[in-house]
Structures are given as structure tokens and as C-alpha cells.
Image (cartoon, rainbow, N blue to C red):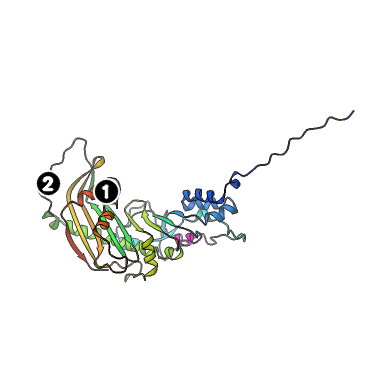
Amino acid sequence: MHPKARIHADPVVEVDQFDCLPDSLVLLILNKVEDVRSLGRCSGVSKRFCGLVSLVHDVYVKIDRVVAVDGDAEDTLNLSSPKPRNIFSHFLKLMLFTIIKPFHNMRNPNGTGRSLFPQLSQHSPAQVLRNFTHIRNLRIELPSGDVGTEEGVLLKWRAEYGSTLQNCVILGGTRVDRKPVGAEHEPSLEDNGSMPESFYTNGGLKLRVVWTISSLIAASTRHYLLRSIIKDHPTLMSLVLTDADGQGTLCMGTGQLKEFRENQLSASACSNRTQVPACNMKLKYAPYLELPGGMALQGATLVTIKPSTEGSYGGHTSRKETDAFVSGAFDGPFKVAVKALMKRRTYLLEMNGF
């Protein structure tokens, strides 16, 4: 009697579904990820992913905290503490840190097994981004705004740069309020379209000058910090440096990045920022503005800034182009505030370079 034959099922062959996807499709997915931390984790999935991560076009870098330029990894800023009131001391602490933790186990795609980041403690975004060889669109977010303001004060700015300042717009207000439902605001007797006399006597003009200088210093400092990133990435077509508070944004397009590479950067005397050129400024003011969503802005101020002389560094921009930049600088109710202020009377000011 022959023993019964045993029937064995064929072993199940597990297929990695990602292996079925072409590299072009995986790269398209990775470009949608953008976040540098998430990309770092993706790079640890496989050798194939590690090689593809370095080819992504769109990258977003979020900075959690900063350390002093001459400090060490332990000398970090406590972001839970109030913002520093001294803008100049704050700028000395703008070396960026702790964005590379997800890349700690990222291996070199050449198969040597050596980590792409042998030193974990003090890597700036420029060092991390050197491992991305095809970046076209880069967005960097700082943990907070650079200019300390009192509670309830509105201060927002946006600047365009090439090798030097090309355009800057600043929107400010002494107080942002929530207007009670159904409440009507009686127009001020001083609001006849002209600057009220009290604006000069109660420190209003001086405050706006401080806002303007502080915002320009913040923009020029950010611009200076980008020089190594731009140098290392000739494929860059768009670069935006903003902050989590939404206070300030520095932006550079394709033409501006090209002009940045072709012209020498002028550092200021303090050497940690780009020199601000002599500028012409247009100031517009309204004592009170009603905004959408039940918001109201007191002491609303709009300052538009352009270099006094426009030569080969960026060329000449028309008034229409400048107005388009100003009107599109901010979103939501602040966009409405800008459009309302653009209709107000204009006051001209001049400022020397610094």
C-alpha cells in the first residue's frame, strides 16, 4: 500500500509593488512630498529611493530652532520664550539647526555605506541641501518673525531680491481688532485723506520709520544667508524664505537668481547682511480700516520701497509691475487692506543706504 502523496501549495512570491512603478512616477510622487524631513525618511526605504530623493525638484525646509553663529548645538534658542525685542541681537542667532535628524541613517547611493551626514550636530540647510542636485523650487520657513512687536500690532513685509533689493512692501497697523457684529464706525474728523497732525506729534511717523528699517534689516539678513544655497544649486528657479508667523517673506525668481549669480554681493559694514541701497519710499496711511471677516485695522500704514537708482542690477520696472507686486504681496483681509490703502494720498520719503 503506497502512502498518500502530499500536496504542497506553491510558495507565495511577494512582489514589491513599488518595484513595478517607473522611476519617473516615483519621482513625481516624491516631488509632491516636498518636506525635507519626510524625504529623508523616504531615502531610508531602499537604495533606489535614496538615489531618487536626491533628484527631487521641489523641496520645503522647516526650521524648528536656531543656534548662535559662534555657539554650539546646546546653545539653542528657546522658542517658547517671548520674542527678543532687540532685532540686532536676534540676527546674530540665525544659523539654522536640527533639520537633518531624518537624514541620520541616509546612506550614500554609491554603496560605500557611509552616511551622507557624518556630523549630526550643526548642519545648516545649505549643508543638507547639497545632497539634492536638481532643486528647482525651494521654500524655507524660519521658526518666527525677525522683528519683535507689541501684542496686537500688525507688521507684515514682502521683499523681492536679485543681488540687491528690487522691491519691498510693508503693511502695518497699531492694532488689529474684531469689530462687534452690527457695530458701525464713525469716520474720524481727521480722516480727510491727508495725514493727520497727530501722526507727527504722537510718534506715529517715528514708529513707521522703525518698522521700515527693521523690516529692511530682516530682509537683507535673510538675503545674505541664502548666498551659499544659491551658489550650490544652479538649477534653482524659485526661492522663498518665510517664517512661521507669516511676518516676512523674501522671494527670488528665475531672473533674479540669475542676476544674483552674475553680480557681486555687497555686504554691509556689519558683514552679516546685504547692504540696503538708497531707496525711495511711498507711505500711505489711514486711521481706521474695516476689513472682511469682522476685522478692523487701526493706524493702517502701507510703505512701498524701491532703490533710488535702477541700473543693470535688475533693470527698470514699470509702475504697473510695481503696483502688481504690491497688490499681490499679501492674502486674505490684508490684501483688501493694501488695495484700500493704495487709493489713499501718497507721501514721499527718501532713505540713504546702510
> From where the camera sits, is residue 288 visible?
yes
Location of residue 248 in the rendering, given as x and y in whole percent from the top left corner: 32, 55
Displayed quadrant of residue 111: bottom right
User: In this view of the protein, can residue 105 be seen by the observer?
Assistant: no
Q: Is 120 part of what is drawn in magenta?
A: yes
N-term mark: 1 or 2? 2
Q: Position of residue 38 (x, y in %)?
A: 49, 50
Which region of the structure is painted magenta? 119-131
Q: Is residue 48 left or right of residue 259?
A: right
Residue at horizontal 45 percent and vertical 54 percent from the top: 59
The residue lying toward the viewer, choosing from 94 and 231, is: 231
Q: Quadrant of residue 74?
A: bottom left
Q: Which residue is under mark 1?
A: 335
Q: Position of residue 256 (x, y in %)?
A: 36, 62
Q: Residue at x 9, y 47 (%)?
A: 189
Residue hosting label 2: 188
- Residue at the far left: name it: 189
* Quadrant showing the C terminus: bottom left
